[in-house]
Amino acid sequence: MGESLFDRAQARIPGGVNSPVRAFGAVGGDPFFVARGQGAYLWDTDGGRYCDYVQSWGASILGHAHPKVVEAVQRAAAAGTSFGAPTAAEVELAEAICDRVPSVEKVRLVSSGTEAAMTAVRLARGATGRPKIVKFAGCYHGHLDALLVAAGSGVATLGLPGSAGVTHGTVADTVVVPYNDEAAIDEAFARFGDEIAGVVVEPVAANMGLVPAADGFLAGLRRRCDDHGALLVLDEVITGFRLGPAGAQGVFGVTPDLSVLGKVIGGGLPLAAVGGRADVMDELAPVGAVYQAGTLSGNPLATAAGLTVLELLDANAYSTLEGTAAALADGLHSVLADAGVPAQVPRVGTLVGLFFAEQPVHDYDDARAADAKAYAAFFHGLLDAGVYVAPSSFEAMFPSLAHTPADVDATVEAAAAAAGALSSP
Ligand SMILES: *Cc1c(COP(=O)(O)O)cnc(C)c1O
């Protein structure tokens, strides 16, 4: 046996991966290396095939290598891959985003969700002249320092650095509150009221497993932001163009000041965006005083892919995808119940979650109390049967438009066997 790809990777890339969750640390074992993807499926470098519910963490809503996306990217590449000067496709994509998301009057394109969230934080501070940002424990907004914060104990705590290399000073203006906890939000506003520039929230939390916002939670945030002159920033990097054309804000009827978009809008290429009220967006350079820039921002390959994806996501696509998600959630729920395994399979529209827990999960503490060992065993049971779900219990499942009813049936069959193995000691 020669040296494996993972051995070589670990020798030259920290942990062998370019983003930590890919290393399978949370589930054990070595990651597979992807050779190619097509539709609902991935093939690894050993020829193994997997039905893929990660789909680049939701970026590939059409499935892998959709022919129209491939063609659009090829056509764009042939005309030059980056100019650092404006192109028509950027204008078309900005218009397509604003047409679909009414709260987005103007939009700035960037290359990653992290960058978009970082810009939203700077813009909220610059536009209000206030320092503090409220975030929720268990919500992820990328790896910008200001939001890479772990909650301290108790409600409405000032942030503690969530990573080595993040200083106390960097997170001193970040206030962390539990998700779905209105009393904690009231406490945060009572303590820091006119210092709060903005509240940043995932309208459906999808980075602590899938945790829906409680009824009225988002409307309550909107009202409190209005009362205190703070901006409401919805991080729709996962939910945008996935729950519907206007994302979670369209589904739940809440109007943010700023939205952070990513994943689906890049069609699997590096593209993200921050958008919102025109007066706030015009605080950005070169109009306003809030600096922001990017060599590859509005990249021609990414805008070509994004435009193609948005054009294909019509009402029919969303109802098909919701049907797929419902079949998956219902199937998983029933095989886990039949096996007598305590599990929750939350679903919000086209997004599905899975917790090995007795009770529904409402916040990060609940999510952390779920049985991660059971998740790891279930993950490997599915993987052995050729089904790839997220290699961590703190993620959602992303069925794509390429998943057929037969794919979902096969997945549920594999899940029945994996659940059976879990329940037999
Ligand atoms: C993935 C994600 C991000 C970060 O996006 P990157 O492109 O990975 O930097 C931000 N917010 C949410 C809600 C995400 O799921």
Image: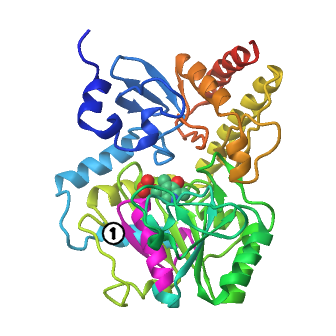
Q: Quick one: 156 or 261, which is closer to the camera?
A: 156
Q: Which span of residues is magenta-colored?
A: 99-125
The residue that appears at 71% across and 75% down in the rendered structure is 221
Query: Against 303, is 210 above or below?
Result: above
Q: Quick one: 61 or 30, which is closer to the camera?
A: 30
Residue 122 belongs to the span the image colors magenta: yes
The answer to whether residue 260 is left or right of residue 408 is: left
The residue that appears at 63% across and 43% down in the rendered structure is 320
The reply to whether residue 310 is visible in this rendering is no
Q: Position of residue 349 (x, y in %)?
A: 69, 50
The residue that appears at 62% across and 84% down in the rendered structure is 230
Q: Position of residue 216 (x, y in %)?
A: 80, 68
Residue 299 belongs to the span the image colors magenta: no
Q: Quick one: 309 or 248, which is closer to the camera?
A: 248
Residue position marked by numbered label 1 in the rendering:
90
Query: Against 40, is 217 above or below?
Result: below
The answer to whether residue 297 is left or right of residue 403 is: left
Residue type, mark 1 in image: Glu
Q: Position of residue 297 (x, y in %)?
A: 30, 66
Q: Position of residue 298 (x, y in %)?
A: 31, 66
The reply to whether residue 246 is visible in this rendering is yes
